[in-house]
Image: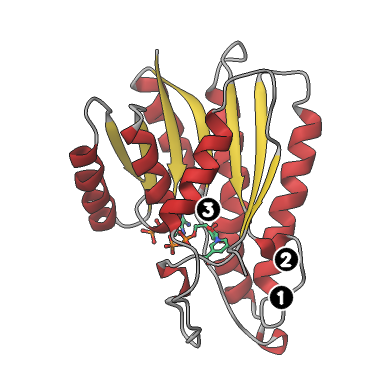
């Protein structure tokens, strides 16, 4: 069995930065995203950076149960075992609370909450209990505070935080480690959404955030980092 790191939303932004950091340290990765071209571009970049790592890609909308099951099947068939799961995929929405609709709720909950749950559940199911598995749930400082114009996004991220805490309780004493990550603003395509014109020029570089996260995750000793909040210096 070959060990891999699975990264949802590994085709861009923070997820790609995490994948880059991992392949540079020789880890094999499986990156997931919805868009084939973005995944192909990301895989080319990762392959150029890696000396020995295998870069696997899979088109997978993590909010879609059958696509998540297909991903699990692929992992099993390839005789891969997940060592690290980075639940990173997500999207933002900035909207006055009075304009919430079923569609906007579903859009935001799809990757940020439902997808995190579906993918985690699949990876837990297919990973033998004797194998060590670290699940890294990337949320946001919007899972710590209530923010203006972010009611649906905050609801999804607070939901993800609740899920993370419950998972930690349920998996205590097993070979599963849970790391909760709460990043602040980063310079990524996350901000390219309608109605959003925030100046992100002094936001954090995803590469620097990825470095902090991967360093916290890969420390191999008796200590375990459980929660990290990452913000820019003011
Ligand atoms: N950027 C920020 O300021 C910021 C701050 C705090 C927290 N965060 C969180 O950090 C995480 C990464 O965000 P980012 O800034 O890197 O955003 P990004 O640049 O927009 O990248 C998002 C990634 O997720 C993928 N994705 C989106 N929905 C998906 C779905 N349903 N299934 C599978 N993949 C999906 C996208 O690829 P496809 O579109 O091809 O699927 C893309 O690879 C998110 O959870 C976000 O909420 C971001």
Q: Secondary structure at mark 2?
A: helix
Q: Is residue 94 left or right of residue 214?
A: right
Query: Where is the N terminus found, in terms of image quarters?
Result: top left
127 vs 50: above or below:
above
Residue 145's spot in the image, x, y percent?
76, 67
Residue 129's spot in the image, x, y percent?
62, 15
Is any part of residue 156 visible from this angle? Answer: no
N-terminal label among 2 and 3: 3
Q: Which mark is residue 151?
A: 1
User: Residue 220 or 19: which is nearer the viewer?
Assistant: 220
Is the CB of the residue bearing disc 3 within 8 angstroms of ligand 1?
yes
Q: Nearer the viewer, mark 2 or mark 3?
A: 2
Within 10 Å of disc 1 (Cα), the crowding (few <14, some 14-19, many 20+) is many
Q: Nearer the viewer, mark 1 or mark 3?
A: 1
Residue 79 placement: quadrant? top left
For the residues labelled 2 and 1, say whether their Cβ atoms are less than 8 Å apart.
yes
How far, Cα to Cα, is label 2 from label 1? 6 Å
Find disc 3 in the rendering and name its residue. 63
Q: Is residue 49 left or right of residue 122?
A: left
Residue 136 placement: quadrant? top right
66 vs 38: above or below:
above
How far, Cα to Cα, is label 1 from label 3? 20 Å
Within 10 Å of disc 2 (Cα), the crowding (few <14, some 14-19, many 20+) is some
Residue 170's spot in the image, x, y percent?
79, 30
Q: Please tell me which residue is depicted at 71% across the width and 37% down the height of the picture.
A: 226
Find disc 2 in the rendering and name its residue. 155
Q: Secondary structure at mark 1?
A: helix
User: Residue 223 or 125: which is nearer the viewer?
Assistant: 223
């Amino acid at each position: 069995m070959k060990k891999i790191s699975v990264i949802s939303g590994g085709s861009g932004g923070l997820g790609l930065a995490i994948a880059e950091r991992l392949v540079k340290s020789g880890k094999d990765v499986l990156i997931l995203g919805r868009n084939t071209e973005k995944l192909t571009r990301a895989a080319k970049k990762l392959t150029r950076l890696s000396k020995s790592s295998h870069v696997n890609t899979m088109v997978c909308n993590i909010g879609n149960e059958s696509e998540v099951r297909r991903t699990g099947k692929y992992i099993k068939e390839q005789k891969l075992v997940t060592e690290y799961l980075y639940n990173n995929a997500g999207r933002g929405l900035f909207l006055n609370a009075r304009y919430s609709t079923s569609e906007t709720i579903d859009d935001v909950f799809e990757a940020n909450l439902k997808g995190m749950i579906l993918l985690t559940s699949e990876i837990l199911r297919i990973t033998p209990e004797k194998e060590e598995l670290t699940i890294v749930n990337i949320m946001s400082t919007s899972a710590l505070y209530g923010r203006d114009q972010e009611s649906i996004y905050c609801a999804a991220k607070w939901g993800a935080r609740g899920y993370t805490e419950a998972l930690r309780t349920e998996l205590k004493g097993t070979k599963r480690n849970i790391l909760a990550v709460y990043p602040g603003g980063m310079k990524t395509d996350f901000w390219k959404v309608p109605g959003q014109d925030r100046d992100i020029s002094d936001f954090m570089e995803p590469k620097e955030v990825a470095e902090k996260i991967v360093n916290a995750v890969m420390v191999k000793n008796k200590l375990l980092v459980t929660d990290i909040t990452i913000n820019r210096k003011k």
